[in-house]
């Protein structure tokens, strides 16, 4: 199950993301927001991060104006690896190397076609599982130097 969250700046692109998911029969839980009325992006980042950490959802997509604020907020939670991606290459390697569990998108940065390609790549790429990448992720989570 995917967890979705956005602020007012991300809302227009989130509509496109949801259309893509609906078309492809991909299940999601939508944590809002649901309009372009001004809200605070950390609220939605926290809802999505908590849904993933509780096991309710396995991955998430967060959208704000740039994708920056909402991924910064999500990354404050240990166990969350949110990657703000602006192209498919970044989305592929966010999964392959970083095992990112949240995709960040910027609604004021990306067109709908580019965003759909990024979402598709993120959802269809598995973590490589290679030792050195696993070790580096462990180093992030555990505050160890090796
Ligand atoms: C809201 O205007 C905007 O600051 C927000 O969507 C996001 O881009 C923050 O990083």
Image (cartoon, grey):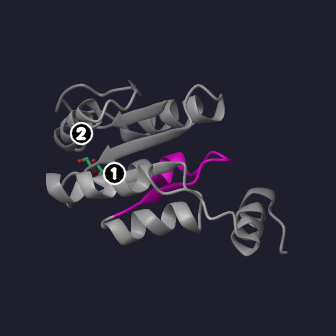
CA distance for labels 2 and 1: 9 Å
Cβ of mark 1 under 8 A from ligand 1? no
Seen at 49% across and 34% down, the residue is 48
Which label sits on residue 108? none
> Relative to 124, is 37 on the left or the right?
left
> Relative to 74, is 38 on the left or the right?
left
Q: Residues within 10 Å of mark 2 (few under 14, many from 20)?
A: some
Residue 22 x/y as whole percent:
26, 30
Seen at 34% across and 52% down, the residue is 120
Q: Label 2's element?
A: helix
Choose between 71 and 17: the one closer to the eye.
17
Choose between 146 and 70: the one closer to the eye.
146
When asked about the image quadrant of residue 32, the answer is: top left
Q: Residues within 10 Å of mark 1 (few under 14, many from 20)?
A: many
Residue assigned mark 2: 20
When asked about the image quadrant of residue 142, the answer is: bottom right
Residue 74 is a magenta residue: yes
Seen at 48% across and 54% down, the residue is 72
Residue 21 x/y as whole percent:
29, 35
Residue 110 x/y as whole percent:
19, 59
Cβ atoms at labels 2 and 1 below 8 Å apart: yes
Q: Which residues are magenta?
A: 71-85
Residue 64 is a magenta residue: no
Q: Is residue 37 visible?
A: yes
Choose between 116 and 137: the one closer to the eye.
116
Residue assigned mark 1: 119
Q: Label 1's element?
A: helix
């Amino acid at each position: 199950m995917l967890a979705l969250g956005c602020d007012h700046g991300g809302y227009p692109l989130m509509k496109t993301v949801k259309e893509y998911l609906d078309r492809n029969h991909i299940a999601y839980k939508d944590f809002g927001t649901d309009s372009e009325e001004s809200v605070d992006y950390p609220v939605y980042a926290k809802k999505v991060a908590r849904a993933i950490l509780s096991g309710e959802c396995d991955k998430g997509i967060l959208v704000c104006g740039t994708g920056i604020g909402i991924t910064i907020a999500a990354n404050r939670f240990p166990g969350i690896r949110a990657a703000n991606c602006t192209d498919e290459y970044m989305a592929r390697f966010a999964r392959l190397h970083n095992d990112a569990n949240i995709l960040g998108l910027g609604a004021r940065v990306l067109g709908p076609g580019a965003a759909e390609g990024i979402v598709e790549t993120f959802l269809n790429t598995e973590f490589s599982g290679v030792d050195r990448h696993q070790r580096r992720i462990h180093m992030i989570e555990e505050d160890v130097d090796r």
